[in-house]
Image (spheres, helix red, strand yellow):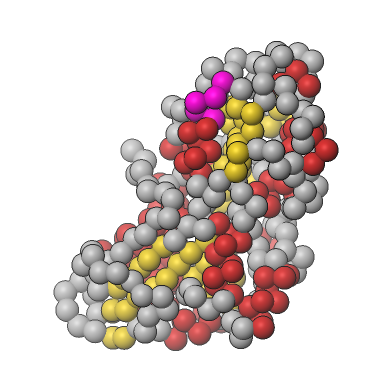
Amino acid sequence: MKRKIGRGIATILALLGLTACGGGTGQQGTGEGGSLSGSITIDGSSTVAPITEAMAEEFQKQQKQVQIAIGVSGTGGGFKKFCGGETDISNASRPIKPEEMQKCQENGIEFVELPVAYDAISVVVNPQNDWVSCLKVEELKKIWEPEAQGKITKWKQVNDKFPDEPLNLYGPGTDSGTFDYFTEAIVGEADKSRGDYTASEDDNVIVQGVANDKGALGYFGLAYLEENIDKVKPVAIDDGDPKNGEGCIEPNVTTVEDGTYQPLSRPLFIYVKKESLNRPEVKAFVEFYLQKENKPLVNKVGYVHLPDTVYDKVQARFKEQKTGTVFTKGSAKGVKLESVL
């Protein structure tokens, strides 16, 4: 049974129920439930948050005196805080952008970039929608490109076989890494999208919007689909490339693992401030996060764990505290982690 996870500005605190302070000073302590104490501040992607929440919950079973606060302000919002020195770790559903990296450099923030899982961006419609089970990439582009704003407002305009029903769109806001990746993969540029849609950094808002609107179409991460499969209906994607599987491919763990769900499969990341790794509670938490023994937690919350060969490279990168990004253009589209790490 899949564990339900709180969303919004979700915060996990230590079992003591104390309030975590930003960038708290770590210290060795004694007592039951582990030898560490201190606080860890995390913010960023709502997509990566379920994984980090699951890891934090299990870690705190061992280290009860470590306080972990997890905020959800979107990948872009998380990087603003991270590069401003407000957080120890930033959850990200896309690589850091050059302009964000520049801000980190200006503020003297060195970071270690760590892939932690794979995800699939899921396109969904209302369960009452009986005319769409699959969409081609060019149809999605027709819906979401900037030129569609105020013009493509009916399903029939997307495909003549669809009914003359209103087309109402729901999706992440512009601070979201899911927005960036989806827009780049479908439209061609990360910041080019129509703006006349209901936007939210909280994926639950998108779920509810689609669930209550017969003409709705929206998108969010795979974990939210699996958690809300009784409320929304997934749409298969046809990218037109026979190398990725014939015809319509549905978003699920199998199609992400075998590479056939394209172009909306992607890696997910955490970014760790190098200076924070001098604090034993932060270093221990990241080590715990990257242990192969804990990869079932990734699957448990609806994502796809990394292959062991990639885990080995990620662990080596962390052990060396190798700073900077391997995604110099800020895009992970079509990139294989095995070849760049």
Left or right of 176, for residue 240 = right
Instruction: Where is residue 327? Give x, y as percent.
Output: 71, 66
Q: Which residue is at the front of the view, 128 or 329?
A: 128
Q: Which of the 4 quarters of the picture holds residue 279?
A: bottom left
Q: Residue at x 49, y 75 (%)?
A: 86
Q: Residue at x 37, y 47 (%)?
A: 5
Residue 338 colored in magenta in the image: no
Q: Quarter of the image containing the N terminus?
A: top left
Instruction: Where is residue 116? Give x, y as percent.
Output: 53, 60
Examine the residues drawn in magenta and state their main secondary structure: loop
Instruction: Where is residue 226? Give x, y as percent.
Output: 47, 36
Q: Point out the stretch of residues depicted in magenta.
A: 210-214
Instruction: Where is residue 331? Give x, y as percent.
Output: 73, 59
Q: Which residue is at the front of the view, 130 or 290?
A: 130
181 shown above or below 78: above
89 shown above or below 50: below
